[in-house]
Amino acid sequence: MSNKGFVSYSLIVFNICGFAEAAESCNVILDKVESTLPEGVPENFATDYKLQEIISKAVELLPGVWKLSGNFHEAIASYRRALLRHWNLDKATIARIQKEFAVFLLYGGVDATPPKLRYQVEGSFVPKNNVEEAVLLLMILLRDSSLKRIEWDASIVDHLCFGLSVSGGLEGLAKQVEEFLPGVLERKLRYYTLSLCYHGMGEDVVALNLLRILLSKSENPNCIKGLLLASKICGENPNYAVEGVDYAHRALTELHGGCPQMASIANCLLGISLSDEARCSVMDSERVKKHFEALQALKTAERTMIERIPKIIYHLSLENADQRNLDVALSYAKQLLKLEGESSLDGWILVARILSAQKRYSDAENVIDAALDQTGKWSQKDLLRTKAKLQIAQGRAKNAVETCTLLLALIHVQSRRTGVLSKGNRSHERSLELEIWIDLAKIYISLSQWRDAEVCLCKSKAISPHSASRWHAVGLLYQAKSLHKEALDAFVEALGNQDTYVPSLISTANILRQKGNNQSVSLAETYLSAAVQLDRMNHSAWSSLGLVYKQRGKDYKATECFEAAEVLEESAPVEPFR
């Protein structure tokens, strides 16, 4: 049978038979072309236009027909065959195949094995999984679009954003967007896409600066997505709380009468930023007002959401816990666990912290144990640290040492297994390890095991020699040995590294107060006033300030401080809610 006759027969099969038979027919066409032209279809083959058109259609349609027949692995093989063999296809056809294949790899739900060795060129990049292969195809499409080889398709960026975000390759996407020629991507979309990339990379200052440009009067001040993202970033840093409130208010203004679900998110972001602003307020009246507004905004978010949003429930629980509405906070935290199918680490830890604030330490530890049973080994670190704190609160120092030791072993094993971590994850791991060594040192200090405490502090020094918390622990060790001068020097060193570190403000003040002279007591009052301003819920700060006032003969103020300290101590969690 001639080539043209065979093609006609295949088209008839395609129209009247099932998808599997049609796919087999297309396969026969391509096998015949490959056997006839093993080096690929030559470029001058286009002289027979009709035959070239049939080949192009067969190459392009075959993967789709395999998908319709349910044979997804054959579809993947056909896509690769179409792209890796030379079929003399035009650029538009190649681009369509590349995009369809990338979309299928990202969303098809089928695990694709790496390309066969026959297609791998020595020294070239070989994708290891679906996402890597899809990203490679989309990057090629993006390059061809930016060079005007094919028509611009905005959906390529959307798919690439998804692929790189799930694979942690946002830095590569940001680089691609920054290298776009003028006119390829609209300026406003460029700013927003870059801000998303940098936010995902943990570069929030860069992301916020890009959003400030986007939301300026000369660009797009009413961009709802940009306003919400800017408010979210500001809500994660108390220094930008006021700015976050402004962005959330602007988003709500633009959403007036619009999507209730987005309005719910905007109210949630408003509540988060108002809560941050409240904690930074100097005046008590302003702080109470902002806390009230934050709670109202979060309640509005809850009332207006169409579907239950875990983030809103979490922050409602957190805000109520901060304001010591512990029963309400616990109710919301339990709702969060149920909403997320008991899979939320933050939910489990929040429930345990609230229970610890109610002095239900045993119940809190049972909650952590339940969470550990349902959590993978590599995700247990924060749970184990909370468990150690609960054991310390119950006077079980030896159990706490065992838990901390297990946690350190877990960190070290994981660091060897995972190799290179992202910047954000690496920073978190090192910070956690530092704090665990310091926690261990404090336990050994409480047990008067000075040598063990010194070893732990030495380990922490290797991680961060200038850490305020490390220097504070050094001061506690000296203080336990009755070396008060050395202890004071260590606490002052901690404040030199972080002048807002509340534990060192309190400890420095306590040593100064014990000196007894007017100048030292006056200085102690200054330190403690700063401590209660920075952390209004710290019962130790209020208690120590009461002792200073009593020493100075200010009995009325001392009584107020002692009463505040007593109330706060009754509802103090083993570790801060936030």
Image: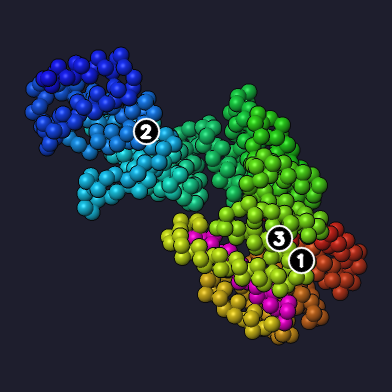
Q: Would you name the residue on which mark 1 appears?
A: 393
Q: Residues within 10 Å of mark 3 (few under 14, many from 20)?
A: some
Segment colored magenta: 426-448
Q: In front of the other: label 1 or label 2?
A: 2
Residue visible at 27% across and 45% down in the picture: 116
Quarter holding the N terminus?
top left
Does the segment drawn in magenta span residue 570?
A: no
Residue visible at 72% across and 51% down in the picture: 351
Q: Would you name the residue on which mark 3 appears?
A: 575
**573 lies above or below 435:** above
- Relative depth, front residue between 481 and 366: 366
Q: Are marks 3 and 1 in contact (CB under 8 Å)?
A: no
- Relative depth, front residue between 94 and 370: 370
Residue visible at 32% across and 34% down in the picture: 74
Q: Secondary structure at mark 2?
A: helix
Residue visible at 37% across and 33% down in the picture: 72
Q: Magenta stretch: dominant SS?
A: helix
Q: Secondary structure at mark 1?
A: helix
Q: In front of the other: label 3 or label 1?
A: 1
How far apart are the two marked residues, 3 and 1, measured between alpha carbons? 10 Å
- Relative depth, front residue between 113 and 273: 113
How far apart are the two marked residues, 3 and 2, measured between alpha carbons? 51 Å
Q: Would you name the residue on which mark 2 appears?
A: 72
Label located before the other in sequence (1 or 2): 2
Quarter holding the C terminus?
bottom right
Q: Secondary structure at mark 3?
A: loop
Amino acid found under the numbered disc labelled 3: Glu
Answer with left or right where residue 98 lies relative to residue 359: left
Q: Residues within 10 Å of mark 2 (few under 14, many from 20)?
A: many
Answer with left or right where residue 172 lies relative to residue 351: left
Answer with left or right where residue 269 lies relative to residue 200: right
| Residue 90 image position (x, y, % from top left) | 20, 28
